[in-house]
Every structure is written in C-alpha cells, then in structure tokens.
Image: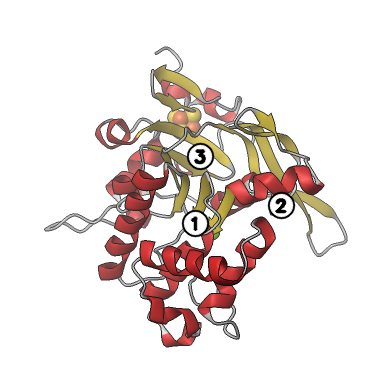
Amino acid sequence: ETVNLSKHFKVHNGLGRKRTLKAVDGVSLTLKKGETLGIVGESGCGKSTLGRTITRLYDASGGKILFEDVDITEMKGSAFRIYQKKMQIIFQDPYSSLNPSMNVREILSEPLNIHTKLAGKELNEKIEETLEVVGLTKASIEKFPHEFSGGQRQRIGIARAISVEPDFILCDEPISALDVSIQAQIVNTLEKLQEKMGVSYLFIAHDLSMVKHISHKIGVMYLGKIVEVSDTLELYKNPLHPYSQALLDSIPKIGSISNFDKILSGDIPSPIDLPQGCRFQSRCKYVMKKCREREPALTPVSKDHAVACHLYDEV
Ligand code: SF4
Ligand code: MG
C-alpha cells in the first residue's frame, strides 16, 4: 500500500535556479496478495519512478510505503533486507539488465547468495529448478546472455526475480522491448507464476492492450498523479477520466485508424511548472472554470472505481 507517496527531484533550470520536478505526487494505491495492478500512462508520467520509489531504489520525498501493514518507507539495515527479498524487479530491457560477463549460473547466484544460505549442490539445484519454471533448459546454466534471444533473456530476468521467492514483483515494462509474438509468451509465463506462487505484480506499461490481460485492476497515471483507478473490466467498459478515454481510444482496432496524438490536442505542461488546478486542463475538451482553480482529488464513484476529475463532482 502507498499512502500519499511522492518523489520529487531538484533540477537546475540552467539559469542557476533550482526547481522541483514532482515525478510522483501524492499517490495512494493498494495491491492485494496474488493480484496484478497495472500502471499505464505516457512516457515521462512517472510510472517507473513510482515503481522505483515503492521498491526503495529511490528514497521517497513524502508519504508512506506499507508492506503487509509494516511501514518500510525509511527502514534500513537487516530489517529492510527481509523486505528486499520480498520485493523483486523485472526490468524493461533484457539486453542491458543482465551483466554480459556473467553466465546464467552467476546471474542467478547473486540474489540467492544475498538472501539465502544455499550453496554447492543445493544452490545448483535451485538454479536449475528456477530455470525450468520459466521455460529454460538446464543446459542454459553455463551460457552467457549474448547466446540467448530477447525473449529468452527476459526469461532469465524473470528467473532472477523469482529465485528468492518474492511476494511482490515490480515489472517495469517487461515486454515492451520484445517482439509482439514473444510478448504473449512472457505475459503467459508471468500469469502462470502468479497462479503457482501467489505473487503480486505491479505491472507498468505505456499502453493498455497487453496490460488488460494480466491486470486485475489498473491505475492510469498522468504527470505524477493517479487520475483513475479501477477494476480492469470496468475501466475498459466505462472509462471516466478524459485522459483514460483518450488512452483507450488510442488502442489500434482492426479496420480503423486510431491515433493517440490526434485524439488529444494541446501541450503537456512541464512537470516542473504545473498549472494551478487540474494537470490535464491543457489537453481536455471538457475543461471548465473550476478545473483551472482547484485540483480534483481521486474520489470513489463505485466500489472498485475512483477518478480525479471535476466532471464527476456531483456523482
Ligand atoms: Fe478535464 Fe476538468 Fe476533468 Fe481535468 S478536472 S480532466 S480539465 S474536466
Ligand atoms: Mg519507464
């Protein structure tokens, strides 16, 4: 669970003045055991920063991160090591996230050496077992990353993440660097793992088409804020935020040409110079006077659906 979580960066504007970039700005989300929460939004909206702040690769600037009700926001040392084991990451690029000078045995040994006492034969068995789970053969163990295809490399990345049996995996665009034909295989592998291990995923993606299959619920992110969060099917049937509607309309459909840039006009404001009121106002066709005055808060409209938009103030 995150409570009002923020990650701000100090940036220089080139004129000697420091400004604040609010990459993640007051995000409150919950993810249950064995569930997948998809996070979607354009590049630069803060998705990866959110994931990295939740997994503590970045220190939070404000708010809280709770893991099984324990506040881990500032936890350190051996106490935090327990949670490091529970939280693993699968990165976007299977080409750069694997050390090219290490073979598969060494790549998978790293987290196991840090978080378990396995050694020798037992360590080897654990590695072989984990490779099998992600669909790689025992023979892979002596090979180096360059000897594998992109999809196979991402399987190694998945094996590295699951080897220590985490409860939570941040999947930061784990399929977007892969061929479309391979993407489905990787998503299926992740789904099977979830069934088997009961692991929870925070699944970051920049489009809504693949994320629909894997996510139980979806958060739509715009300029550091969650503007809508909903049960997945409900979001597809009934997107409420004008930005979510544009994102959904941008999914290419057979027989029609659809283009996100055409659907949305207007400029995206600079994240270091956000307007007063709603951050989507410059691109919104429904913009009203109050949108320029007050920022809409994420407000529930039904049991599993919340939106941050003044169009629903009376609902
Ligand atoms: Fe558009 Fe106003 Fe809703 Fe923002 S609050 S998305 S500007 S209608
Ligand atoms: Mg990213």
Q: Position of residue 57 (x, y in %)?
A: 69, 54
Disc number placed over residue 280 in the picture, else none: 3
Seen in the picture, residue 102 relative to 23 is either above or below; the reply is below
Q: Is residue 96 visible?
A: no
Q: Position of residue 75 (x, y in %)?
A: 77, 41
Are the residues tagged 3 and 2 within 8 Å (C-beta)? no
Residue at image mark 1: 162
Whichever of callouts 2 and 1 sits on the residue coming sooner in the sequence is 2
Q: CA distance from mark 3 to mark 2?
A: 26 Å
Seen in the picture, residue 41 relative to 157 is either above or below; the reply is above
Q: Amino acid at mark 1?
A: Ile
The residue at the point 52 percent across, 26 percent down is 298
- Element at badge 2? loop
Quadrant position of the N terminus in the picture: top right
The residue at the point 46 percent across, 46 percent down is 201
Seen as rendered, the residue at the extreme right is 16
Whichever of callouts 3 and 2 sits on the residue coming sooner in the sequence is 2
Q: Is the distance from the Cβ of mark 3 to the nearest ligand 1 atom less than 8 Å?
A: yes
Residue at image mark 2: 58
Colour mode?
secondary structure
How dense is the environment of label 2, judged by Cα within 10 Å: few (below 14), some, or many (20 and up)? few
- Element at badge 3? loop
Please state if 85 lies on the left or on the right of 208 as rendered. right
Seen in the picture, residue 65 relative to 290 is either above or below; the reply is below
Please state if 287 lies on the left or on the right of 293 as rendered. left
Whichever of callouts 1 and 3 sits on the residue coming sooner in the sequence is 1
- Element at badge 1? helix
Front residue of this view, candidates 158 and 94:
158
How dense is the environment of label 1, judged by Cα within 10 Å: few (below 14), some, or many (20 and up)? many
